[in-house]
Amino acid sequence: MKSAIIKLLILGATSLFFACSSPIKHVIVSPEISIVGSNLYQNKQAQLSFSDLRRSNHIVQILRSNQAAELYSPQQSLVSTVESSLTSALKANGLSVQPLATNQIEVIIDNAMVSVHQELLKYTANNEMNVRVVVNNSQGTLTKAFRVTGKSNGPFKADLAVLERDFNQQLATLLTQIVQNDELQSFIQ
């Protein structure tokens, strides 16, 4: 009798554990930078490096009162996506990426988060992205901070597809600001 009760308790606990655990949730990060190829960086070379200093990997968190947060991470690492997108945009604008170039450009992701406060009949989403660009060359060091924020709200439940779209649009805006920044263009030799 005791062993039957123990087996039922173990089965119940196991079922409860698997019912409470949720599958890993992902969002697709794919910013579309709409920069027409130009000669902004013509005859300039740079070595690029990228780092991610965020405390956690997720980029979307949905918060509900008295419940665990729902966290969504990018399918591919955010730093890889930023590296691919920004490198392509800089090359399209004339920059030659070389491993031992005079200009050393480091791109640092400090923050990239969509925080949703979900209530029963409405939600509010706050987005924030912070990226620093540090350029070292014979002139010295230039550090530029780039920031994009956004806020949205709506009735009922937040739509993950809309949050994903907004994140990608804001990331594209931020990367475009980096490529088109006059101070960076003139500092890079």
Image (cartoon, rainbow, N blue to C red):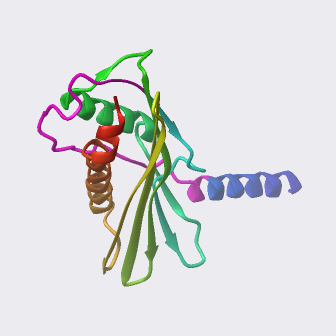
108 with respect to 149 (left or right): right
Residue beneath the point at 38% across and 33% down: 83
Asked whether 37 falls inside the magenta stretch, the response is yes
Q: Quadrant of residue 82?
A: top left
Q: Position of residue 171 (x, y in %)?
A: 32, 51
Q: Is residue 159 above or below residue 51?
A: below
Q: Quadrant of residue 13?
A: bottom right
The answer to whether residue 107 is visible is: yes
The answer to whether residue 23 is visible is: no
Residue beneath the point at 75% across and 52% down: 10
Residue beneath the point at 39% across and 77% down: 124
Residue situated furthest front in the rendering: 139
Residue situated furthest right in the rendering: 2
Q: Nearer the viewer, residue 75 or 35?
A: 35
Residue beneath the point at 57% across and 45% down: 53
Residue situated furthest bottom in the rendering: 121
162 with respect to 125 (left or right): left
Q: Main secondary structure of the magenta part?
A: loop
Q: Quadrant of the N terminus?
A: bottom right
Q: Is residue 126 above or below residue 65?
A: above
